[in-house]
Image (spheres, grey):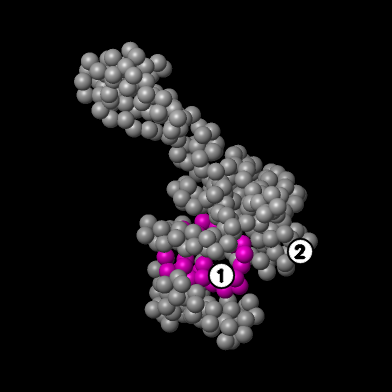
């Protein structure tokens, strides 16, 4: 797994790390010894089915609950022995909005500033700056209950940033948002990371992880089933192929005879060649076709996506039992 590096060539401390992290509720094991290392200034995405333990992991790392075993450090501080130091370095946006709908957006921001013990002047300045940054200035004086889902989510994240945290936990931040609001949130996350913030993201939107995450882990049955970049995870799953389509039956027949290990579709005049999708392999196939004077009318490359990875690692979708872990 990639790690951040200091100028002297030695790995720098991870923003978030966990070793053998365990958590049970009664006789139900939710986390069964997970290991994580998340470099500073990156986006880490934790994927998993409903009830897999994603929120439990966030709650432990953000000091909201205690682990039953293992160790974890956030911003260089042990979550068990130095929870106050951890809390001073992080911000948390949970599944359920912390926005108070009975007061205005601005009042929500000022309340958060008071909780961070900012002076009146500094709190108002910070609130104004963040409301502008999240395009909420015009709605600042309106009751938050009148906000759309996307606006409430932006306000929720703005409130999280009042304390200028170095590390932010976003637990399914775009659930229920329309595509435009989701893309707006993605852009905000990218801007935060560009400024040096570390983001720990849980999501059920595989496209979201693919778009944002530097590193991805898939959580299943309390364990990390796989971990790596999106490209590395996709390479775990077979099924990549190059598809050649022909319009001339004679050329199709010649190509089918010439090429090895192809799957034929005589009706559609297409050939499917197993491939990892690499540029080198594609060039090799094109060079071979050119050398024998065969030209396909259409060539497409198909590689496994994160959906394929997710279902291969976690099995078919299941309807979770209504239990304490369903909200975790």
The x, y position of residue 240, in whole percent, is 44, 30
Residue span colored magenta: 150-174
85 sits left or right of 241 in the view: right
- Name which of mark 2 and mark 1 comes first in the sequence: 2
Residue 109 appears in view: yes
The x, y position of residue 309, in whole percent, is 50, 37
Label 2 Cα crowd, 10 Å radius (few <14 / some 14-19 / many 20+): some
* Image quadrant in which the C terminus is located: bottom right
Magenta stretch encompasses residue 165: yes
* Image quadrant in which the N terminus is located: top right
Residue assigned mark 1: 161
Q: Residue furthest top?
A: 257
Q: Residue at x 62, y 78 (%)?
A: 115
Q: Residue furthest bottom?
A: 121
Foreground of the two, 58 or 9: 9
Q: Residue at x 68, y 69 (%)?
A: 88
Check contact, mark 2 vs mark 1: CB within 8 A: no
């Amino acid at each position: 797994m990639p790690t951040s590096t200091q100028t002297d060539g030695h790995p720098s401390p991870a923003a978030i790390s966990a070793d053998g992290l365990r958590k049970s509720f009664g006789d139900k094991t939710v986390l069964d010894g997970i290991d994580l290392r998340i470099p500073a200034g990156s986006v880490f995405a934790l994927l998993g089915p409903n009830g897999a333990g994603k929120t439990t992991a966030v709650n432990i790392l953000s000091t909201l609950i205690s682990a039953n075993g293992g160790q974890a450090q956030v911003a260089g501080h042990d979550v068990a022995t130095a929870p106050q130091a951890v809390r001073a370095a992080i911000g948390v946006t949970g599944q359920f909005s912390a926005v108070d709908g009975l007061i205005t957006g601005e009042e929500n921001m000022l309340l958060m500033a008071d909780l961070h013990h900012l002076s009146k002047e500094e709190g108002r300045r910070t609130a104004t700056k963040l409301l502008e940054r999240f395009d909420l200035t015009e709605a600042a004086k309106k009751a938050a209950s009148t906000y759309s889902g996307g606006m409430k989510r932006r306000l929720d994240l703005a409130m999280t940033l009042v304390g200028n945290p170095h590390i932010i936990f976003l637990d399914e931040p775009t659930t229920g948002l329309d595509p435009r609001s989701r893309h707006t949130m993605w852009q905000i996350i990218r801007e935060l990371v560009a400024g040096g913030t570390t983001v720990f993201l849980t999501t059920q939107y595989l496209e979201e992880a693919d778009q944002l995450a530097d590193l991805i882990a898939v959580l299943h049955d309390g364990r990390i089933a796989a971990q790596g970049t999106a490209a590395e995870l996709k390479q775990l799953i077979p099924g990549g192929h190059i598809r050649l389509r022909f319009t001339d039956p004679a050329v199709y027949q010649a190509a089918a005879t010439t090429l090895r290990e192809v799957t034929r579709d005589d009706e559609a005049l297409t050939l499917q060649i197993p491939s990892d999708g690499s540029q080198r392999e594609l060039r090799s196939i094109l060079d071979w076709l050119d050398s024998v004077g065969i030209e396909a009318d259409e060539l497409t490359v198909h590689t496994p996506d994160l959906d394929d990875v997710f279902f291969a690692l976690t099995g078919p979708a299941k309807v979770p039992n209504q239990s304490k872990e369903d909200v975790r």
